[in-house]
Image: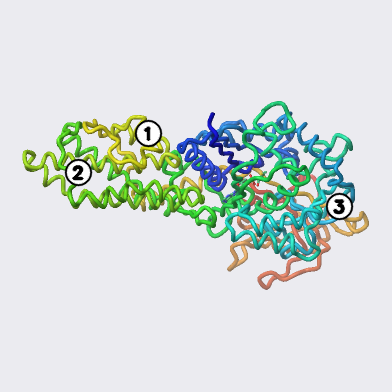
Amino acid sequence: MNDKKFYITTPIYYPSGKLHIGHAYCTVATDAMARYKRLCGYDVMFLTGTDEHGQKIEDKAREAGVTPQQFVDDIVTAPGGVLDLWKLMNIKYDRFIRTTDAYHVSAIQKIFKQMHDNGDIYKGAYKGKYCKPCESFWTESQLVDGKCPDCGREVVDAEEEAYFFRASKYADRVRDLLMNTDFLEPKSRVNEMVNNFIDCEGGLQDLCVSRTSFTWGVPVDFDPGHVVYVWLDALFNYMTALGYQNDKYNDVEKFWPADVHFMGKEIVRFHSIYWPAFLMSLNLPLPKKVYGSGWLLLDGGKMGKSTGNVVDPYLLAERYGVDALRFFLMRSFPFGSDGNFSNELLIQTINTDLANDLGNLVSRTTAMAEKYFGGKLPEARQADHELDGSLISLASGLRGRYEEQMEKFQFHNALEEIFKVIQRANKYIDENAPWALAKDMDANGARLAAVLYNLLEAVRVCTVLLIPFMPESCDKIFAQIGADEAARTWDSAAQWGVLPAAVSVTKGENLFPRIDMSKELAELEKLQEAAKKAALPAVEIEPQLEEQVDFDTFCKSDFRAVKVKSCENVKKSDKLLKFILDDGTGVDRQILSGIAKWYKPEELVGKTLVAIVNLPPRKMMGRESQGMLISAVHTEKGEECLHLLMVDDAIPAGAKLC
Ligand code: ME8
């Protein structure tokens, strides 16, 4: 039995819209970590999934005219959905949980009841602010400029009967956990959590853990009308997916506590404060570590599905290959910090590291083995040359340096160590000048064979350690350099001379072709712009106002049918049209309207429109406007559209609309 076990999780994703490369970032990191642990011989459980309840999903489903279950099913399972994206990104998870799965739902009901029965969940009334996109409660004083401190969007008033979790009871234990252990990393996040949420004014507040104003959630079975707060529901996925409080699985004993939960920094609060407090309430062991990654930024702001500033992983994977994309994400940004995504950085990373350094090393080495030895190295060698020492010692020590970084989740540093060896190997080619040796094979053949063998070994060691990042490309490289299974293992990465002396090499396809930066940037921008447009909702209309207007106030507005006598562009304005209108009074009425973008003056003459005529006159570009024309507006594919309200010609000018 394997007693080396490793349990790692990603956050479970909200299927409220298409996932973007920012989501892929954390999952690729988790996949790389899981593959690394498997490579090291661990029995790994890698869990991911979807977090499908909550008000936001219910609202979105209503807007789309489908049930919440249909809505989430579509985003999770449809082509281009969550499951598809993980397939595309070559994410090899061991288990996928959906919080709408029946076993999870009933487990959450039991968990909620247990916490209620032990006195940690009690009934009260919630009054405060709620951010729907983040599904987070806030007090007035926590808001920043009146908006959600996490995402900067509008919050709404929330007032309802609710159950509360006695988080305050666990404040001291959670503070101790954060301050005095390695539970939360990077360490830089600890102070923020403790100062803002535990040692803040009023201390750690009890958490509202049920809602009554909507129904899309796990029902509290002993109090109909309440649904469990989505974060309590979601966080317990890490245990229900192992079989906690259900019979679907039986892995709690084997894999709990988790070795590490990976997540983006904005949800560290839930994972480092409430999650351990929930577990303390149930006397369950705590996860060993919670690690908050940084965000992928685009144009300086967080890439986010509700802001629309997203980069589509499908488009990039199709153009450059999944491995190049996975590599770029892990190589370019330190996992704990924010990173600025740009097309330029992506192409530059592919060109520099993959095409110039790794691709070149593999293709030069295999091409020379073919050219000089027909692909099969002779066993006669002149090894132990003075030029070999530094390459061999650098490559032989690589696994240790790499492991040190991987264990700290410093993926970019682990890759940096590999690339130091790759660069050294490329330099070794130049130092040994195989093309010069090849001029006199009788004298130098044995030396040339040794040089090529050393290069193949350097490639092999690096490739073993690249498996977690670029599994498919590594398989191709192994095939080219003649590495069998035994030469692809973790153990073999710390050994030199594993390839057989008479190794067979086949030069294959060029794995990472160089990209023409300026041509590609222009092309990519065009494609991304088109994709952005296509992703915009076909027709978007403004939400109706919630504030009511009383009938008497409404009746004070005087709407009339007006006939256009003349219409012209206002000089020096590209927006305004000037209308002379017959409003039935016998005196011409002049109205200016900012609609030149949508209408040519001549097409409006003779039409009967609708105007509000008792607005106070106002000056526009030095001319008086006596009222306002009424139009209908909406957004289509991101473009504002406007239609003047036109009525039947049979309606006489001056008729009152009521
Ligand atoms: O938070 N850069 O789901 P989610 C890096 N359902 N990471 C990003 C990112 C970006 N631009 N945008 C999003 C949720 N993410 C909850 C989790 S766990 C019990 C429940 C990351 O779909 C984000 O930080 O909004 C989070 O870790 C993950 O994507 C899922 O985000």
Residue positioned 67% across, 34% down in the render: 252
Residue drawn at point x = 10 percent, y = 42 percent = 444
The image quadrant of residue 614 is bottom right
Callout 1, which amino acid?
Asp
The label nearer to you, 1 versus 3, is: 1
The amino acid type, in three-letter code, at marker 2 is Val
Considering only vertical position in the picture, is 190 above or below 476? below
Query: Left of 86 or right of it: where is 657?
Result: right
- The answer to whether any part of residue 37 appears in the image is yes
Asked if disc 2 and disc 3 are in contact, CB closer than 8 Å, the reply is no
Q: Nearer the viewer, mark 1 or mark 2?
A: 2
User: Which labelled disc corresponds to residue 475?
Assistant: 1
540 vs 79: above or below = below
> Quick one: SS at disc 1?
helix
At mark 3, the secondary structure is strand
Residue at which label 2 appears: 451
Q: CA distance from mark 1 to mark 3?
A: 56 Å
In depth, the one of 159 and 58 nearer the eye is 159
Between 333 and 183, which is closer to the camera in this rendering? 183
Residue ID at (73%, 70%)? 624
User: Between disc 1 and disc 3, whose residue precedes?
Assistant: 3
Q: Between disc 2 and disc 3, whose residue precedes?
A: 3
Residue 314: give its label.
none
Determine the secondary structure under disc 2: helix
According to the image, label 3 marks what residue? 126
Which corner quadrant of the image does residue 360 belong to?
A: top left
